[in-house]
Image: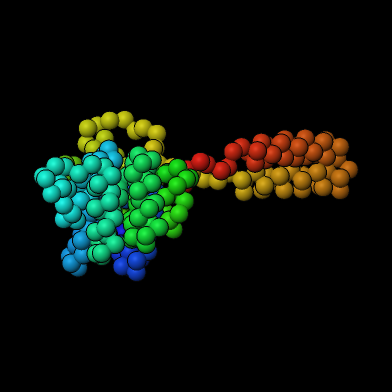
């Protein structure tokens, strides 16, 4: 596994070893799952007990955690523990042992399981949650947050070149540079773009969420039209003064409209 987020991995493992928890957020395909797997593997290599889980029902999640940590899932009579019994057994094990929970795609977990994670967090259990735009509530509000940024152009080109080699696609450096613009620093999209090129599919609109903020351009336009008005006054040109005034008002209205749009999302990241 070629991991490009080495710096982030080091920071995350250091946080977990210190006994703290962390929430990793980022758009879909940005590399959260691969990073979580790398962190879990490094901790395992150091001799720690680690449970790496994916979304499932509460009972399934608890069972998988217990199995990975070596917690007994049956009672003395050989019957499978209930959900309450599994929660109790796991909590007891974590209080007596140093272990880590790596929870991928945590935004898909049930409220019941997220409540269990809250209880563990209150008991100072180190947790690593990875999520795409998680809701701004419960456990997601209680953990320090680290947002994964888009990968660099060089990293994206490396991923695209490697995937092109895997599928048997001959591609030039110039072609890579052109295709890279459709990825927005997203490694999953980088691979998909190569597959689309391999299949001869037409260019499609980008799926990434890295967009340009147009506010500075509106402000610049407002200043330019204001200058036009001043020049119109200086030259005693009624036309320039009126045109500058009208355009200034129009840009001002657009700016007010943009600023009135909802800014606060109900989700983190």
Horizontal arrangement in the rendering, residue 102 relative to residue 26 (left or right): left
Q: Quadrant of the N terminus?
A: bottom left
The residue lying at 56 percent from left, 43 percent from top is 264
Q: Quadrant of residue 126?
A: bottom left
Q: Is residue 218 above or below residue 68?
A: above
Q: Residue at x 86, y 48 (%)?
A: 234
Between 206 and 202, the one nearer to me in the picture: 206
Could one spot residue 20 in this view of the protein? yes
**Image side of residue 60 versus residue 111, left or right:** left
| Residue nearest the viewer, comparing 20 with 222 | 20
Residue 182 can be seen, yes or no: no
Residue at 31% across, 59% down: 5
The answer to whether 57 is drawn above or below residue 129 in the figure is: above
- Residue drawn at point x = 55 percent, y = 46 percent: 213
User: Residue 255 location in percent, x, y?
Assistant: 67, 40
Residue closest to the eye, 124 or 259: 124
Residue 2 place in picture, x, y as percent: 22, 56
């Amino acid at each position: 596994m070629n991991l490009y987020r080495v710096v982030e991995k080091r920071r995350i493992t250091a946080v977990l070893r210190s006994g703290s928890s962390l929430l990793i957020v980022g758009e879909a395909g940005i590399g959260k799952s691969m990073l979580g797997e790398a962190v879990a593997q490094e901790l395992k290599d150091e001799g720690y007990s680690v449970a790496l889980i994916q979304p499932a029902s509460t009972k399934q999640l608890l069972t998988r955690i217990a199995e990975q940590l070596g917690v007994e899932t049956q009672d003395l009579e050989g019957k499978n523990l209930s959900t309450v019994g599994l929660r109790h057994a796991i909590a007891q094990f974590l209080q007596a042992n140093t272990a880590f929970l790596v929870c991928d795609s945590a935004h898909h977990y049930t409220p019941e399981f997220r409540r269990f994670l809250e209880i563990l967090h209150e008991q100072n259990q180190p947790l690593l949650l990875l999520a795409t735009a998680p809701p701004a509530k419960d456990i997601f509000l209680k953990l320090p947050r680290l947002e994964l940024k888009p990968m660099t152009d060089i990293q994206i080109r490396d991923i695209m070149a490697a995937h092109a080699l895997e599928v048997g696609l001959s591609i030039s450096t110039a072609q890579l540079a052109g295709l890279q613009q459709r990825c927005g620093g997203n490694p999953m999209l980088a691979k998909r773009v190569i597959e689309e090129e391999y299949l001869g599919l037409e260019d499609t609109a980008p799926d990434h969420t890295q967009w340009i903020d147009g506010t500075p351009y509106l402000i610049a336009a407002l200043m330019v039209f204001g200058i036009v008005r001043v020049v119109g006054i200086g030259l005693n040109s009624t036309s320039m003064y009126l045109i500058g005034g009208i355009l200034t008002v129009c840009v001002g209205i657009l700016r007010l409209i943009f600023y009135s749009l909802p800014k606060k999302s109900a989700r983190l990241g």
